[in-house]
Amino acid sequence: MIAVFLRELRLALRHPAEALAAVLFFVIVCALFPFGVGPSPEALARLAPGALVTAALLAALLPLDRLFAAEAEDGSLDLLLTTGLPPAALAGAKAAAHWAVTGVPLILATPVAAALLALPTEAWGVAILALGLASAVLSLLGTVGAALTLGARRGGVLLPLLVLPLAVPVVIFAAGAIEAASAGGEARPFLLLLAAFLAGALPLTPLAAGAALREG
């Protein structure tokens, strides 16, 4: 499992375009909001929690349709599944690599996006933590979606339709945490709910994705 994770990181470092595209998408979407709603800091600050979370989750979706596709095309996926590595472990390594390659850069870009949306600086720390948890959950859910749509026609279209409805609670909790922090309230309950969602997804989603790979 560790070898697969390190292999994914090496491949991502050789071809950083997908991670860079996700970060640029995240920042550009956040930069468009002032043009759409006006430059008023008060209006932007009200929209900032939902805009940050939604833009980050949509950006994280961009590379998901290629999560297993390259290995499936050249036959290396079948080889990995016949080496004795459990399919769930392979799916878990893929999810971890996706978060490391896509989620972590999005987290690092969060202060820039927060500044573009006039989010109060005292809420930046909560925004980083909330997006870190939310992006980890999306990586796990997206791995299941990528495994289920592997080999399907128009899989890139089906993948968001499968993953985004499951991510609705994540959007609600993450945006709630950021909104509470920006209003001077208590963000801890929302962060705990996000952590609980992540704790539930950690053991279940690799099993589901592994079953889909095995049957596929």
Image (spheres, grey):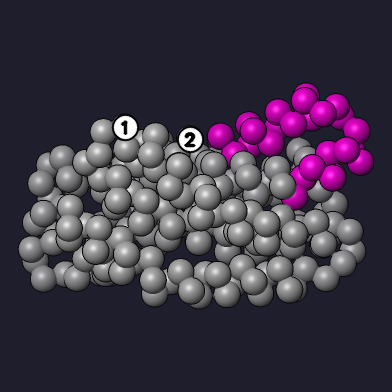
For image coordinates 43% across by 71% down, the residue present is: 202
Q: Nearer the viewer, residue 14 or 154?
A: 154
Find disc 1 in the rendering and name its residue: 154
**Left or right for 122, reference 80:** right
What residue did someone put label 2 on?
21
Res. 161 visible in picture? yes
Residue 216 image position (x, y, % from top left): 17, 52
Stretch of the chain drawn in magenta: 24-49
Residue 104 can be seen in this image: no
Q: Which mark is residue 76?
A: none
Q: Amino acid at mark 1?
A: Arg
In the image, farthest residue toward the top: 35
Q: CA distance from mark 1 to mark 2?
A: 21 Å
Between 16 and 50, the one lying in front of the other is 50
Q: Amino acid at mark 2?
A: Ala
Residue drawn where x is 89% and y is 59% of the image: 183
Say left or right for 169 vs 189. left
**85 in relation to 215, above or below:** below
Task: Give coordinates of residue 177: x percent, y percent.
Answer: 74, 62
| Label 2 packing within 10 angstroms: few (<14), some (14-19), many (20+) | some
Q: Quadrant of the N terminus?
A: bottom left
Which of 120/14 is in front?
120
Quadrant in the rendering for residue 124: bottom right
Position of residue 214 in the picture relative to residue 119 (left or right): left
Q: Residue at x 54, y 54 (%)?
A: 167
In the displayed structure, does residue 117 sit left or right of residue 212?
A: right
